[in-house]
Structures are given as C-alpha cells and as structure tokens.
Amino acid sequence: MTRQQILTLTAMASINFSSMICYSILGPFFPHEAEKKGVSQAVIGLIFGCYAFCTLVGSVVLGKYIVQIGAKFMLIGGLFVSGGCTVLFGFLDRAPEGTVFIVLCFVIRSVNAVGFAAAVTSSFAVSAKVFPHNIATILGFMEIFTGIGLILGPPLGGWLYQSFGYEIPFIVLGCLLFLTVPLNMWILPSFDAVPSQASFFRLCSRVKILLICFVIFTLSSGIGFLDATLSLFAMEKFSMSTGSVGLLMIGVSLPYGAASPIFGIISDKYPFIRRWMMVLGGMATAVSFCLLGPVPVLHIESQLWLTVIMLVVIGFSLCMTCIPTFAEMLICAYENGFEEGLSTLGLVSGLFSAVWSAGMFFGPTVGGYITQKLNFEWSAAAQGALAFLAAFLQIIYFINEEMQKRRLQQSTRTESSLITEEKSPLLSPAHH
C-alpha cells in the first residue's frame, strides 16, 4: 500500500467512526428529553425517521453531481455541516417546548442528514477510486469503524448525559467531527474527473442492480427495526435494565464489525462467491429473525439465550450479505457500459446510500407500527420474510442467468461447428 492509500484509509475510517457515533448517540436519552418537552412517541419516531429520509434525498442528488461539486469539497463540507448541526442539537433543551422545539428538531436533524449524506457518498466514491481492485476488502475494513461507532455511541452518549447533562454529549461529538475537517483537508488528494451523461434511471433500469438494491434495503431495514424495537421488547419480556439492553445491541454490531474484514477479503479473492454470499446471508437472516421472537406459529418459548444467539447470527449474516453488494453493483454498472471513473462511482455510491437510508426509514416506522398493532414477534418475522424474499428472487435471477449463458454457449458451439463443416471439404485432401 502506498502512503497515499494508507492516509486515505485513515481519513475514511475517521469519517465512518465519527459520523456513526453522532448518528447513534440519540438513542438512550433523546426520547426521554423530548417527552419532557411534550413530544408524542409518534413524533419522536418521525424525528428519527426524517434523518434517514433526508439522507436518501441528499445521497441521490449529491451522488449525481459529485464531479461538479468535487469529491474532496463535498466530503469536507459535509463533515463541517454535520459537526455544526450536532453542536446546535445540543442547545435544543433551551428551546421552548411544543411546536418550536419539534420544528427545530426537524430542521437541524434534516440539515445534519444532508451533511452526513455528502460525507458518506463521497467517502464511498473516494475509497473505490483509490482502491479500484480491493473494493470489498476496503468496505469490510471501513465497516469495522462503522460498527465501533454504533457500539460506542449509545453507552458513551448515555454516560455523558448522566454525568454532565443534555448539552455536553452533542458538543463533545460535534467537536470530534470538526476535528476531522482539517485532517481530511490535509490528507485527501483532489480528484480530477469529467462529468458523464449517465443517470440514475439508466442505472436502475438493470434488473440485477434493482435486485441488489432490494437486498441492501432489507439489510438496513432489519438494522433500523432492531434499533427501534429491540430495547422495549427486551425490557418487557426479560425485565432487563437500560444498561443491559445496550449490551444486547452489541450482540448485532460486534459480530458485524468483526466479520466485515474477513468477508471483504473473501469477496475480493473469490469474486464468483459473492452472489452466493448474498443468498446464504439472506437465508440465514430470514431464519434468525423468525427465531428472534420467536414467531408464535412455532410455539417456542421466548428465552434470553435464544434471543442473544439469534442476534449474533443476524450480525454475521447481515455482514455476509452486505459486503459484496457495492462491488457487485459497480461491476454490473461497468458491464452495462457505464464508464470507469468518479462519476459512475458517485452514482453507485449515491444509490447505495439512498437505498440504505430508505431501509433505515422503513424498518423503524413499519416495524414499529406492526409491533404496536400485533407484537414484536410478528414484526421480527416480517423482517425475516423480507430477507427471505430478497434471497429467493436472487436465486431465480442467478439460475435464469446461468441458463441463458449455457444457451448462448451452445448456440455459439453449433455455429462454429457449422462453419467448420462448411470449410472442411475445401481443406481435406483430394480422395482417390
């Protein structure tokens, strides 16, 4: 690895880590603070959800114009905006309760999301640009820091909140984001690129891209669903304390972060395995979500050890499914005539971030709704069904693809044999 690559990797790791910590810090204490300000449970859900929605819109737009804006500027600008919003969010406890508080929450959270989308979309594109042949390995490496950020966010936030009150967690983490700005200005090179005419519609007109998008959607939907509903289920079912529930969430993020680099290396070394990694991962996710509750149909008693084991399996299987997706989308884009360069990388990473955010919005909102109407067990099973559907559709697509390839090979064989038959009498020696 060159010095430039090592520095780029350091920069990307710092971005993933700090932005994920800022994203996950709200979990333990914000709902409680918002309730004090007279905000209903439904609106709190929307405040969390609007982040994902704005990231979705931001990713699509910024991914399209990454070349015009400039990848480096987009990344640094995004970090700066995100840092500023995180600090501002810390002063919301001084806002008057009711409508003013709610509006300010939405505005700051939405702007923060667009900043986050800018940083993440360009960091994906930059990573793929600097490491064109090891995309999955680098993604795997970066997911470690995403995992660490998600693991440390809630306990760190909870601890700072208990020790110093509402404002300090946001100010500390906002400053952490500000620190990454000069770091990235110094480390990252500028990327020259030519804008291309490629569009999202052309990218999404490929069946395989749509399939992979659906896979990414089910992944983030599952993670978002657990974020929103697992803590309440564990508290009611197993009468656990807030601290212990925080440890339960690590059951998903720890195996996810630990397995990422391994699956990344496997995916880059044996590219033909990627599709089956996505299928197997999807099947394993489906089974473990159904056993997480477990589904009432199975008549299995809810037990803490079973829930913990299933969470660990979900962590592994989500990781196994997720790591190959970005590389597969890029390859599919190149095969369909998209030019290799920053503009295609921007499109693909924008699409990836957008679909991921869509799942992050869908999981908590729909999962929360089903949990409210039925219960957690059925809601988890619905997530499992989504994962199963994604895996099943992939199997059909891959089998169909194989059959088409074979037909093509056979037709070329018969054509070549016909040609050789036509030529053979001319070539054969004269018979006496």
Image (cartoon, rainbow, N blue to C red):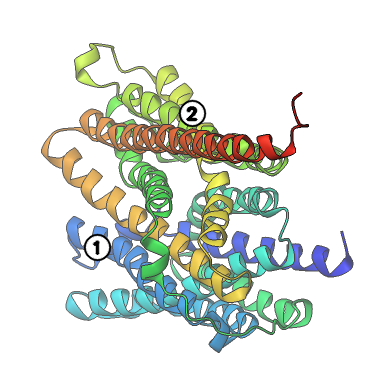
Three-letter amino acid code at the position of disc 2: Leu
Which residue is tagged 1? 46
Mark 1 or 2: the one toward you: 2
Three-letter amino acid code at the position of disc 1: Leu
Q: Which mark is residue 280?
A: 2
As helix, strand or loop, the secondary structure at mark 1 comes to helix
Residue 45 placed where, x, y %? 25, 58
Q: Is residue 312 left or right of residue 55?
A: right
Classify 232 as above or below 204. Answer: above
Residue 409 placed where, x, y %? 54, 36
How packed mark 1 is, by other alpha carbons closer than 10 Å (few <14, some 14-19, many 20 or more), is: some
- Between 197 and 231, the one lying in front of the other is 197
Find residue 403 and report its image quarter. top left
Classify 222 as above or below 21. Answer: above
On-image quarter of the N terminus: bottom right
Residue 333 placed where, x, y %? 52, 61
Q: Residue at x 62, y 59 (%)?
A: 17
How packed mark 2 is, by other alpha carbons closer than 10 Å (few <14, some 14-19, many 20 or more), is: some
- Between 355 and 142, the one lying in front of the other is 355
In this figure, what is the number of numbered marks?
2
Q: Residue at x 65, y 70 (%)?
A: 126
Residue found at the very far left of the displayed protein: 373
- Between 158 and 431, the one lying in front of the other is 431
Any part of residue 250 in sight: no
Q: Is residue 241 left or right of residue 369?
A: right
Mark nearer the N terminus (1 vs 2): 1
Q: Residue at x 46, y 65 (%)?
A: 165
As helix, strand or loop, the secondary structure at mark 2 comes to helix
Q: CA distance from mark 1 to mark 2?
A: 33 Å
